């Protein structure tokens, strides 16, 4: 009998990754459980607007405790790996910079690219595991015809996490198992129950893990204060698309494209010719927030750069795809064409609302993720 | 799988004699030492016998021994118990967290605190202690041997300086106990902490030596146990175990056990460093306790090495564990001005008298292999500059 393959399981202390560990264990793999300690929730606890306690947050002691309990239950070795420095550098700081420059970042994708896959695969290989398994809802498979690893939507469309995974390289995909790709969430909970995992009914995590309460503005204040800095003054004018100044704002980081509330124009000023005003765009260089009507919020196209292709080696000719421009967006048909060395333009069949710089544009061909990039 | 334990500075297993001595005190001799009846008298007798054994181990009077729950409580009792708001406390940057975090708390509670630096070998300069003394200095707390590097501190000199200045002196001797002769007269300390589980007694028992006429305020209020210095029913079996372990440790030191084990540590250190290259031992030029070596391996992540070694059966530690169990950069190596990358690539191997030559052979065999594998995977290693590899 040959030695079973060693696989490192990325364990968050949640139901999904715990169930992955239980599934692979029963399939006979040699497992090592790993948790990346990404952020110290106590660091900003108690600063204005931040919660005093850190219970039930990602990277909290409760989650590590849960992951440890599961590992003990399954009889697998388990380690916590400190990656706080890298997380701060590769995820938190870009997140802060993006907001301060008037863009709306997607930290989960950066975390996947830099930590959950790059770093975890490095650590896994260092400790003798060539492949990792995660609890993401996604599928990946090798297609010999194209000689490529393909990333596909999962069976449970409501849990689809492929939007956050478009940055995975071929090497990363070839070394990753997504055992939950063919399961629906209720089935996963049932499996967890069957395996005797005490946390089978633990609620799903929803918010950005390092921002308890989900208020990113409070986080920006607290984080910068912790570093002895403060939010730079980016206050300026609210202008219409024709350049007319309609008001003042307190800083561009308070706005995101499509936002309707908090424009500071009052109930009367918030309405022009009977229609409410939305943020249409943010001009970071001039500290201007552009507002306009619902009709002005739609875009016929988008440009994206820092591209990663998965189903194809590169984009050579025009391609019909469905484009997803934010996590909870119903993908829209568009035609893709390269518009620069590392820039693609997608022309939508139907104009789309609130195309937001800083978010990811992910391109789908049916079930497959063709690739993606960052909206300019 | 063969498993070799080289983390004695974290904890040690009970010696069989210690376990046997404790056993009856969990069952038939279970009394409360404060009770009047025969069961209580039997327990009291055992507690006092253990107290005498510990007193002999420290060369002090039995009445100067206060049993606590361990090193952390002893350190806290010393620091909180011997200082008042307005007092000045001198300690160092390389103390155990039980002292550093207690001192930080004291600083929030009206005490003035000085954290002295150390030299590159991890030793405090007694002259720095002398210079730091001011009119309101009440207490000096300097550890006897460092838990991460094994570096011994000049406690006798510091004791003399403290006496000259009329300042009280506490030493955390948790990592020195069982490895060095402990004599509170030679050290010149008023307060000294030891922990049971570092000397093959159980976890959850410790001692604070409190010199006669040294006043300390208790941490807990309750009964009049331990001459009103530590309320709470005595941990009977733990105390008995600590008494036995102290007796055995004293004999071991008298018989020269540490000398033989020191040769084992030195061989392991030399052979590992020679085989892996771009490596070395921290505090090697300092006087060190015999059981500890803290090795650095450039061009790799210490955390991955600890995990790799554990998966191959060798238990060692790196950095200090934070609440989640992840490693944090060592405050001791940082205080020694070890560059951050090297501090992260440093592992502590700590032996005990149960360590064998075969255990050392095992470590010498698997550590270089694990290091080689990690370096093979490290982009930094392939691109390393020759200058970096010769500097230390």
Image (spheres, coloured by chain):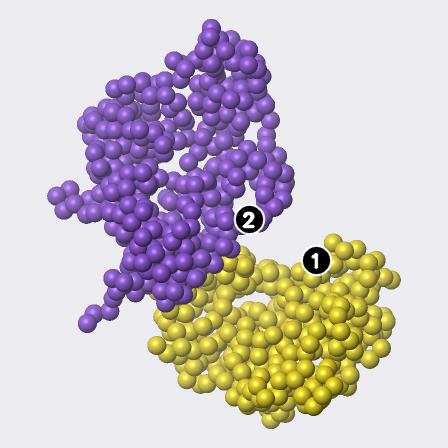
Would you call the spot at circle 1 few (<14 residues within 10 Å), some (14-19), or many (20 or more)? Answer: some
Residue A36 coordinates in the image, percent (x, y)? 44, 53
What residue did someone put label 1 on? B104
Apparent side of residue B185 relative to residue A236 in the rendered image (left or right): right
Residue B117 image-quadrant placement? bottom right
Pointers 1 and 2 in contact (CB under 8 A)? Answer: no
Residue at position x 26%, y 47% in the image? A183
Apparent side of residue B21 relative to residue A310 in the rendered image (left or right): right
Residue A47 coordinates in the image, percent (x, y)? 63, 41
Whether residue A79 is visible, yes or no, is no
Front position in the image: A138 or B370: A138
Where, quadrant-wise, is the N terminus of chain A in this rendering?
bottom left
Disc 2 is placed on an element classified as loop
What residue did someone put label 2 on? A54
Residue A32 coordinates in the image, percent (x, y)? 36, 62
Residue at position x 27%, y 63% in the image? A26
Chain A pictured colour? purple
Residues beneath discs 1 and 2 located on the same chain: no
Residue A229 vertical placement versus B312 (above, below): above
Residue B38 image-quadrant placement? bottom right
Residue A159 image-quadrant placement? top left
Whether residue A158 is visible, yes or no, is yes
Chain B pictured colour? yellow
Mark number, residue A78: none
Front position in the image: A250 or B362: A250
Residue furthest out toward the bottom: B255
Total marks shown come to 2
């Amino acid at each position: 009998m040959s030695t079973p393959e060693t696989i490192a399981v990325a364990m968050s202390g949640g139901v999904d990754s715990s169930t992955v560990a239980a599934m692979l264990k029963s399939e006979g793999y040699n497992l090592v459980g790993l948790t990346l300690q990404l952020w110290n929730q106590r660091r900003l606890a108690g600063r204005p607007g931040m919660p005093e306690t850190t219970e039930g947050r990602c990277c909290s002691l409760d989650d590590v405790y849960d992951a440890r309990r599961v590992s003990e239950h399954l009889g697998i070795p388990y380690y916590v790996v400190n990656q706080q420095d890298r997380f701060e550098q590769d995820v938190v700081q870009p997140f802060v910079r993006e907001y301060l420059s008037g863009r709306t970042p997607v930290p989960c994708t950066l975390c996947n690219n830099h930590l959950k896959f790059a770093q975890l695969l490095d650590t896994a290989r260092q400790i003798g595991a060539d492949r990792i398994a995660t609890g993401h809802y996604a599928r990946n498979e090798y297609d010999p015809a194209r000689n490529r690893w393909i990333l596909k939507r999962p069976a449970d469309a409501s849990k689809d996490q492929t939007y956050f995974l478009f940055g995975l390289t071929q090497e990363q995909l070839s070394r990753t198992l997504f055992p939950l790709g063919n399961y629906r969430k209720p089935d996963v909970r049932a499996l967890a129950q069957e395996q005797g995992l005490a946390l089978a009914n633990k609620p799903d995590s929803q918010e950005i893990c390092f921002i308890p309460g989900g208020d990113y503005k409070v986080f920006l204040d607290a984080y910068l204060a912790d570093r002895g800095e403060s939010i730079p003054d980016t206050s300026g004018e609210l202008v219409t698309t024709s350049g007319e100044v309609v008001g003042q704002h307190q800083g561009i980081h308070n706005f995101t494209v499509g936002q309707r509330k908090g424009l500071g124009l009052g109930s009367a000023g918030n309405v022009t010719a009977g229609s409410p005003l939305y943020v249409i765009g943010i001009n970071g260089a001039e500290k201007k927030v552009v507002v306009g009507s619902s009709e002005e919020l739609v875009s016929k196209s988008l440009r994206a750069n820092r591209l990663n292709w998965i189903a194809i080696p590169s984009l050579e000719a025009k391609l019909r795809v469905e484009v997803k421009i934010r996590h909870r967006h119903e993908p829209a048909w568009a035609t893709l064409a390269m518009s620069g060395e590392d820039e693609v333009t997608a022309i939508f069949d139907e104009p789309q609302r609130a195309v937001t710089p800083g978010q990811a544009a992910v391109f789908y061909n049916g079930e497959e993720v063709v690739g993606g990039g960052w909206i300019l | 799988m063969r498993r070799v334990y080289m983390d004695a500075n974290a904890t040690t297993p009970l010696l069989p004699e210690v376990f046997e001595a404790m056993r009856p005190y969990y069952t038939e001799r279970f009394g409360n030492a404060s009770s009047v009846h025969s069961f209580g008298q039997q327990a009291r007798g055992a507690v006092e016998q253990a107290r005498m054994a510990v007193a002999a181990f420290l060369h002090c009077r039995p009445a100067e021994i206060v049993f606590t729950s361990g090193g952390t409580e002893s350190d806290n009792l010393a620091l909180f118990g011997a200082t008042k708001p307005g007092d000045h406390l001198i300690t160092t940057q390389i103390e155990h967290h039980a002292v550093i975090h207690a001192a930080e708390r004291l600083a929030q509670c009206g005490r003035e605190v000085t954290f002295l630096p150390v030299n590159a070998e991890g030793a405090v300069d007694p002259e720095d202690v002398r210079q730091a003394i001011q009119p309101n200095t009440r207490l000096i707390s300097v550890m006897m041997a460092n838990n991460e590097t094994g570096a011994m501190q000049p406690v006798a000199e510091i004791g003399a300086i403290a006496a000259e200045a009329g300042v009280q002196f506490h030493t955390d001797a948790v990592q020195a106990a069982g490895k060095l002769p402990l004599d509170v007269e030679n050290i010149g300390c008023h307060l000294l902490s030891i922990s049971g589980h570092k000397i093959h007694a159980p976890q959850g028992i410790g001692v604070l030596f409190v010199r006669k006429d040294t006043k300390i305020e208790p941490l807990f209020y309750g009964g009049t146990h331990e001459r009103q210095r530590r309320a709470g029913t005595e941990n009977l079996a733990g105390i008995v175990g600590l008494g036995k372990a102290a007796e055995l440790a004293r004999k071991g030191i008298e018989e020269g056990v540490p000398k033989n084990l020191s040769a084992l540590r030195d061989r392991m250190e030399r052979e590992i460093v020679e085989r892996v290259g771009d490596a070395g031992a921290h505090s090697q030029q300092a006087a060190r306790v015999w059981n500890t070596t803290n090795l650095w391996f450039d061009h790799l992540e210490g955390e991955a090495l600890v995990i790799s070694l554990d998966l191959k059966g060798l238990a060692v530690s790196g950095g200090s564990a934070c609440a989640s169990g992840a490693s944090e950069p060592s405050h001791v190596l940082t205080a020694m001005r070890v560059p951050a990358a090297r501090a992260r690539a440093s592992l502590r191997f700590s032996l005990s008298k149960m360590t064998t030559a075969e255990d050392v052979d095992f470590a010498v065999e698997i550590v270089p292999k694990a290091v080689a594998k990690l370096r093979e995977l490290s982009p930094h290693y392939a691109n390393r500059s020759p200058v970096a590899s010769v500097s230390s």
